[in-house]
Image: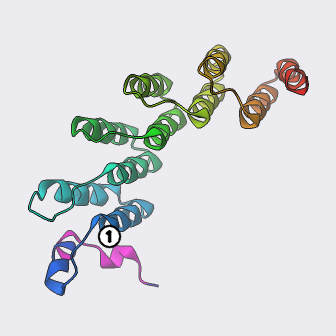
């Protein structure tokens, strides 16, 4: 099987039209994803910049999926600052993220224990009119639990209910599991009893 790392180079993408094949957003997305999967997010970012810089007619500009791919790539490589800065640049360029992209950024920040930044993204999401979903809240609650921030987890649980995104079975199982792992089985039992009612 031919590896993407053996086939990709910026100039070869530029030669595609000479071969009678015009790159489109799908072909660029495949390359971006392949590079990020191989932990080559910096190369993928160069390709993204090349796409953005080419303003000629018929050329495709990066879209929300292009940016999301790069952002996720940097999060997976542990470069939280770079992932977040690309997210902010995407916003500056007027590309509006949807709930899936916001969830992805919040997840990356939570996994990096950057809860305050994740909270800022949640607030920005709401301010932009994108409604958080159950996954959004579950991701934040999980992040708080991983850090032992029980008060914040409960506050987010209440906010989730208040916003009409009521907790689901995943929420409760996650909470009970974290509580039990941290010696708070009596609290987990109360949650279990509450669910069982």
**Residue 54 placement: quadrant:** bottom left
Question: Depth check: 56 or 76 in front?
Answer: 56
**Residue 187 placement: quadrant:** top right
**Rendered view: 99 above or below 161:** below
- Location of residue 121 in the rendering, given as x and y in whole percent from the top left corner: 42, 28
**Rendered view: 117 above or below 108:** above
Which stretch did the figure color magenta?
A: 2-12
Q: Residues within 10 Å of mark 1 (few under 14, many from 20)?
A: few
Where the C terminus falls, by quadrant? top right
- Location of residue 18 in the rendering, given as x and y in whole percent from the top left corner: 13, 83
Secondary structure beneath dot 1 equals helix
Question: Depth check: 172 or 79 in front?
Answer: 172
Circle 1 is placed at which residue position? 27
Question: Depth check: 129 or 118 in front?
Answer: 129
**Rendered view: 128 above or below 3:** above
Residue with the most extreme left position: 56
| Identity of the residue drawn at 29% across and 63% down | 25
- Location of residue 110 in the rendering, given as x and y in whole percent from the top left corner: 53, 33
| Identity of the residue drawn at 21% across and 40% down | 93
| Identity of the residue drawn at 82% across and 20% down | 184
**Rendered view: 151 above or below 49:** above
Magenta span includes 5: yes
Q: Does the magenta stretch mainly form a helix, a strand or a loop?
A: helix
Residue 164 horizontal side relative to residue 108, left or right = right
| Identity of the residue drawn at 24% across and 38% down | 94
Question: Depth check: 20 or 113 in front?
Answer: 20
Magenta span includes 136: no
């Amino acid at each position: 099987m031919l590896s993407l790392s053996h086939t990709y180079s910026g100039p070869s993408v530029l030669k595609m039209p000479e071969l009678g094949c015009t790159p489109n957003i799908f072909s660029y997305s495949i390359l971006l994803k392949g590079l990020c999967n191989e932990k080559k997010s910096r190369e993928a970012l160069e390709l993204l910049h090349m796409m953005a810089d080419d303003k000629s007619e018929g050329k495709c500009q990066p879209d929300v999926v292009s940016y999301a791919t790069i952002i996720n790539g940097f999060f997976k490589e542990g470069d939280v600052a770079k992932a977040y800065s690309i997210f902010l640049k995407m916003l500056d360029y007027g590309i509006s993220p949807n709930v899936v992209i916001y969830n992805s950024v919040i997840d990356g920040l939570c996994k990096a224990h950057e809860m305050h930044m994740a909270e800022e993204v949640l607030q920005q999401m709401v301010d932009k009119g994108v409604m958080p979903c159950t996954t959004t809240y579950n991701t934040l609650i999980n992040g708080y639990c991983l850090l032992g921030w029980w008060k914040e987890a409960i506050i987010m649980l209440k906010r989730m209910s208040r916003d009409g995104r009521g907790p689901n079975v995943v929420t409760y199982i996650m909470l009970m599991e974290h509580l039990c792992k941290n010696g708070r089985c009596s609290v987990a039992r109360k949650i279990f009893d509450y669910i069982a009612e």
